[in-house]
Amino acid sequence: MGSIFAAIVGIILFVLFSPYFEREAPTTDLKGPIYWNFKTPLKLKISDNRALGKYKVEVEEKGRKTILAEGVAADGQKELNLTLTYPKNAFLPTSSDARITVEATDRSLWRFFSPNRLEAKVQVVCDITPPTASVISSSYGIAKGGSAAVVFEARDENLKSAVIRTAAGRIFKAQPFVKKGFYIALIAWELKDDNFAASVVATDLAGNETVVPIGFFQKRVVYKDTKLLLKDDFLNQKIVELSSSMQATPKTTPLDRFLFVNNTLRAENEKLIAKVTTRIGDNMVDGFFTQPFLPIANASVVGSFGDHRSYYMGNDVISESYHKGVDFASVKEATIYAPNNGVVIFNGANGIYGNMLILYHGLGLFTLYAHCSSFLVKEGDLVNKNQPIAKTGMSGLAFGDHLHYGVLIQGVEVRPLEWLDANWIKLNITKVIDEAKTQIASRK
């Protein structure tokens, strides 16, 4: 009797704890409602903690069914990543009753030697109509390395996004403007791109997309090429200081340190800047600044934007870089002023940029202040135009007291001199906004 009892207990324990009798049903990442144009492939995942068995995915509406996928998972397969295409001659669901059904089993014997089962149903909304989009107003032209403004309209009952996309693949987000259905964006022609084109791209939840080109006159700008000879005092002073974070050995040469600073460290520092300056608000706006973004009074320009710098040892080019700001020199530890209202979003050390401060001014526009000796504001502070924010210095890769001043649009460095020019702002920003507001006001 005892042996029978022990056997029964053993069987019970085996059933309860054996992986062959596990109790978890398969799962899917399917969540609804799903908006589908029935042209774009639909991606779906089915998974199980141990092993999948049979599976079937279908669209159904009022008794009509179309199978999208059906089969049996390979032995021991825990996950299926399906890319589903809709058959060309199948019916298109039109009612709110349409559903996508996912059925799957595992290889468990828990349910009286039958597998655990998944059955998930979510609503599928058929949407084959693309959004409408049109350009309302834009800057007449854009310069290489420069900026422009665009106001556009984009509408769809199921609108997902409305952005500006350049030919190089850069996406500039837009902000709601004046009233629902209208958007504004500042955009940039990246310094590294030889040519430029941009379009409004409106996409709905079903994947339908409308692309409307924006007509810009391209202004060619020739930037300076500078040849710099690497000297011992340069390599043995600032470069040694800035290369302290590299994995140096007794065999590390001054040239190795320079390459680390100009290539590796510079890339890390620029990556941080790009990360910090990609934000844009989602609140509705109806205007922007009309006054120049001047950060320092009575200063001379000692370094230009877009300067291509080649570093030589003897006759050989060792490395290169682009100067992505304007350098202003004045008196030692000159006061830097907020060029317009903004918020401090970064305040700290950043490698070759030294003590660096960044302000956000709205519409994806940022200003950057590098090589500072001290800060007069802290991160999170709201600042007003002409408020003292920092002092110039020579922290980072700087050999004299000055301000490296940068302007960025959603992570892209642009020509600061445009934003210092009242006439440029009037023609390329203010005029675009005013014309757009007039057109929008005339519409019902």
Image (tube, rainbow, N blue to C red):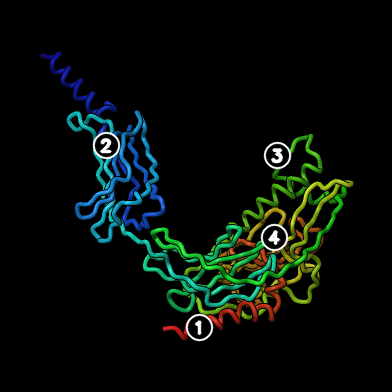
Q: Which residue is mark 1?
A: 439
Mark whose residue sits in front, 4 or 3: 4
Could you tell me how far apart the alpha carbons at marks 1 and 3 are, in whole angstroms?
60 Å
Which is more N-terminal, label 3 or label 4? 4
- Label 3 sits on a secondary structure element that is loop
Asked if the residues shown at circle 1 and circle 3 are in contact, with their CB atoms under 8 angstroms apart, the answer is no
* Amino acid type at mark 4: Asp
- Quadrant occupied by the C terminus: bottom left
- Please rate how many residues cluster around mark 1, counting C-alpha atoms within 10 Å: few if below 14, some from 14 to 19, many from 20: few
Q: In terms of depth relative to the viewer, which is nearer, 84 or 117? A: 84
Which is more N-terminal, label 2 or label 1? 2
Mark whose residue sits in front, 1 or 3: 1
Residue 20 horizontal side relative to residue 40, left or right = left
- Label 2 sits on a secondary structure element that is strand
Residue 298: image quadrant is bottom right
Q: Which residue is mark 2?
A: 105
